[in-house]
């Protein structure tokens, strides 16, 4: 099998190794069959640019190309075509389309493709930044003006210092006049400037930190909203830890850079420009010498800068990968402990952290070299100034005060340029953090939760029709789960789906909840395509969903149940808890409904969690109830209590039950057996037993397993 897997890689190592393999066999391109690949390249590139169907189209095209060019053969050339040319072609196509591809091959002619259509190198979007800055514009302008003022004062200081030196030099030379009187004026002026500069600095730092904090908090809220807006497929493809990293450290990094650019950056830039003007006024000749060196510095800086930017992006991605590993291990800490896998998780984390440490060290080294080189260059400028200034002084083209002013001003330029060079590293990190933060802000989910859909005015009967549904998970293209699936759930009836594990039962429930949309076919609610209905209404009021592993929030029992209907009164919460057989155990806790359930409900038993989840679903009084293996994780006693609650909850509603334990669904109005993405048998329990088909087989198998 030729296996194509495109993913975001930070090192590019897999791509490089493939390219190396490919380069060794470039003569293969001379083969007439190779033209087949090239004829597919434009289609593949176009496909890669269209998220959604990109993956399946890539898969199809690659499969066709490989089948045509590499027929089943044991000849070395054919095998090489399958192994090297196919993956290399996909890699190149992906690279051409701006994606990074990783390919593997083995001995089958089928092609399986998994392609990430995400851009591996997000761009910094200035227009989005502008949206965040706009509300803070006045404060920002205030900060800019104050920072600018402080910088302008800094330009004045060398000139006054020069004046003071000239007074001192003249007094030492001539010993005439009133020294104190002469020096008092400029000295007081200088003191005044220092005071005003202090005030301006305090002012702009206060304003700037206000702007920075507000921009960062707006960005966090917007990014969080954008993430919550994404459909389930997005979360299948992205690790939670990495997403959380964008909300936390990336925004923090961006905020620091933003503040530094405005404060230090603006100040240093203004001082550099202003002091250059002063330098020119004091001595155009000396300034000319300084200016010659600058373009070389700027050119070199830009070159090293682009390299550092890339390093920074890779390092940040590696940090978020490490966070992802930690998040997964800590989030599943019970499983980790149950399997005594602490050491393995530690090793995995240590490996990722070590890699991130190496990358950050390389980045640090790069920035250090950059700063070191800048410092050497800038100090050389000072040395050159003293050398050249001395000869101008000897030739009476400059006064000692002028040389003093020139030196102080060029020191200010030096300090400013040095701080710009330090700032540069921060800006590099800030830009790539910003790009990563903005990447998801504009990402539109294919399934919109809010707005657009209609809400039927008449009351619902709860009839559901799945009509000719085909579906493939976006993260696993080429593996079709549902193939022409048809099913009707009559109003207020209970329909159960049973069948082999992995047959697609939970997928049916996920499609009804619109976690995903089918590739083909429609799902109707009371004769209306659910894709035309308001999704928030559908999920919030029509469908109640209870699954095998109820996830509770780390708040009180009351708040957890109220999650199903935020406006519910305490009486409604208690009534839902009673229906769910939960009231008695809740009131047995010292804090009753105020009991905090711990992270993900960790302080409750499986049966208790499930009953709270049932109450949470019932409180919205849903017309349709979906129970996805709701009791299969429970022991016999808990199952009995939960089943009792479910029996009560399902009365008068349309119910879809997905079950493993066939004993729990024998009373269903209709039982459907699913296999390979289709319903292969349907009827009541007795009808199906009488038929002796797949359902009877399942029953027989389960009984045999129970006896073991
Ligand atoms: N989010 C997902 N992304 C990609 N593939 C998935 C995803 N969820 C499920 N699958 C795959 O879809 C197929 C059907 O899964 P599904 O959960 O619907 O089966 P099931 O019949 O409910 O199985 P079980 O009885 O074991 O719960 C499986 O091959 C599974 O690996």
Image (tube, rainbow, N blue to C red):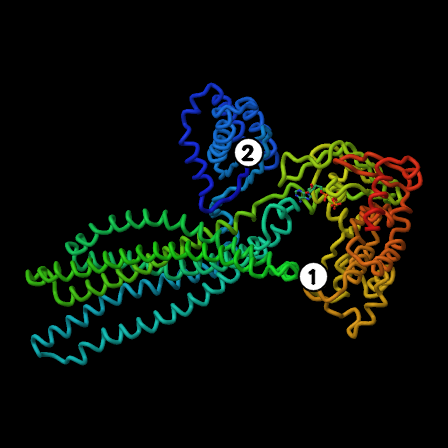
- Nearer to me, 706 or 409: 706
Q: Position of residue 225 (x, y in %)?
A: 62, 53
Q: Is residue 315 left or right of residue 656?
A: left
- Nearer to me, 106 or 687: 106
Q: Position of residue 420 (x, y in %)?
A: 33, 57
Determine crowd level at label 2: few under 14, some 14-19, many 20+ residues with C-alpha closer than 10 A. few
- Residue 164 vertical placement versus 77 (above, below): below
Residue 550's quadrant in the figure? bottom right
Query: Farthest residue in the front direction?
Result: 708
- Nearer to me, 233 or 13: 13
Mark toward the start of the polypeptide (1 vs 2): 2
Q: Is residue 156 left or right of residue 172?
A: right
Residue 448's quadrant in the figure? top right
Give residue 106's mark: 2
Q: Quadrant of ligand 1?
A: top right
- Residue 549 vertical placement versus 459 (above, below): below
Residue at 30% over, 59% down: 418
Q: Label 1 vs label 2: CA separation? A: 42 Å
| Quarter placement of the N terminus | top right
Please, what secondary structure does the residue beneath circle 1 have?
A: helix
Determine crowd level at label 1: few under 14, some 14-19, many 20+ residues with C-alpha closer than 10 A. some
- Nearer to me, 261 or 116: 116
**Mark nearer the viewer, 1 or 2:** 2
Give residue 600's mark: 1
Residue 216 visible somewhere in the drawing: no
């Amino acid at each position: 099998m030729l296996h194509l897997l495109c993913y975001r890689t930070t090192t590019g190592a897999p791509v490089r190794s493939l390219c190396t393999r490919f380069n060794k066999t470039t003569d293969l391109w001379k083969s007439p069959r190779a033209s087949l690949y090239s004829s597919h390249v434009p289609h593949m590139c176009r496909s890669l640019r269209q998220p959604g169907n990109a993956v399946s189209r890539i898969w199809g095209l690659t499969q066709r190309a490989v089948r045509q060019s590499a027929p089943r053969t044991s000849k070395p050339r054919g095998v090489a075509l399958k192994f090297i040319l196919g993956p290399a072609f996909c890699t190149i196509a992906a690279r051409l389309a701006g994606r990074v591809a990783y390919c593997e091959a083995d001995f089958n002619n089928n092609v399986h493709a998994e392609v990430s259509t995400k851009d591996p190198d997000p761009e910094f979007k200035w227009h989005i930044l502008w949206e965040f800055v706009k509300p803070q514009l006045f404060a920002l302008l205030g900060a800019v003006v104050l920072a600018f003022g402080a910088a302008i004062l800094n330009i004045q200081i060398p000139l006054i210092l020069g004046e003071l030196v000239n007074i001192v030099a003249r007094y030492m030379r001539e010993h005439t006049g009133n020294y104190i009187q002469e020096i008092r004026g400029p000295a007081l002026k200088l003191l005044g400037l220092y005071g005003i500069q202090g005030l301006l600095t305090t002012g702009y730092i206060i304003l700037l930190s206000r702007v920075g904090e507000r921009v960062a908090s707006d960005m966090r809220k917007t990014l969080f909203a954008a993430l919550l807006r994404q459909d389930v497929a997005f979360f299948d493809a992205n690790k939670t830890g990495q997403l959380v990293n964008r909300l936390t450290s990336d925004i923090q990094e961006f905020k620091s850079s933003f503040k530094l650019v405005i404060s230090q950056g603006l100040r240093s830039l203004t001082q550099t420009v202003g002091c250059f003007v002063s330098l020119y006024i004091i001595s155009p000749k000396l300034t000319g010498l300084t200016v010659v060196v600058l373009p070389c510095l700027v050119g070199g800086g830009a070159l090293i800068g682009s390299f550092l930017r890339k390093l920074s992006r890779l390092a940040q991605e590696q940090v978020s990968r490490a966070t992802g590993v930690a998040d997964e291990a800590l989030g599943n800490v019970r499983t980790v402990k149950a399997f005594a896998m602490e050491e393995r998780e530690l090793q995995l984390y240590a490996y990722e952290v070590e890699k991130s440490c190496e990358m950050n060290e390389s980045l640090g080294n790069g920035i250090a070299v950059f700063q070191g080189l800048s410092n050497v260059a800038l100090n050389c400028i000072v040395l050159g100034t003293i050398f050249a200034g001395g000869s101008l002084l000897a030739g009476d083209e400059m006064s000692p005060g002028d040389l003093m002013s020139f030196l102080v001003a060029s020191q200010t330029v030096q300090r400013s340029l040095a701080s710009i060079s330090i700032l540069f590293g921060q800006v590099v990190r800030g830009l790539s953090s910003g790009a990563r933060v903005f990447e998801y802000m504009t990402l539109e989910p294919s399934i919109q939760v809010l707005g657009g859909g209609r809400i039927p005015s008449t009351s619902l009967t709860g009839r559901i029709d799945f009509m000719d549904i085909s579906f493939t998970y976006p993260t696993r293209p080429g593996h079709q789960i549902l193939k022409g699936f048809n099913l009707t759930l009559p109003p207020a009836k209970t329909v159960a789906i049973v069948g082999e594990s992995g047959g697609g039962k939970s997928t049916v429930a996920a499609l009804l909840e619109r976690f995903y949309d089918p590739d083909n076919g429609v799902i109707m609610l009371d004769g209306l395509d659910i894709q035309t209905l308001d999704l928030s209404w559908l999920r919030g009021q029509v469908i109640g969903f209870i699954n095998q592993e109820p996830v509770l929030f780390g708040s009180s029992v009351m708040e957890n149940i109220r999650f199903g209907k935020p406006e519910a009164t305490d009486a409604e919460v208690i009534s839902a808890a009673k229906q769910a057989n939960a009231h008695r155990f809740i009131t047995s806790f010292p804090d009753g409904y105020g009991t905090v359930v711990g992270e993900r409900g960790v302080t409750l038993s499986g049966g208790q969690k499930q009953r709270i989840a049932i109450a949470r679903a019932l409180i919205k009084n849903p017309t349709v109830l979906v129970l996805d293996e709701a009791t299969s994780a429970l022991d016999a006693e808990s199952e009995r209590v939960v089943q009792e609650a479910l029996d009560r909850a399902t009365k008068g509603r349309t119910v879809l039950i997905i079950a493993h334990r066939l004993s729990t669904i024998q009373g269903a109005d209709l039982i459907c057996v699913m296999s390979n993405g289709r319903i292969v048998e349907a009827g009541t329990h007795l009808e199906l037993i009488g038929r002796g088909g797949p359902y009877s087989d399942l029953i027989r198998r389960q009984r045999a397993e129970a006896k073991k």
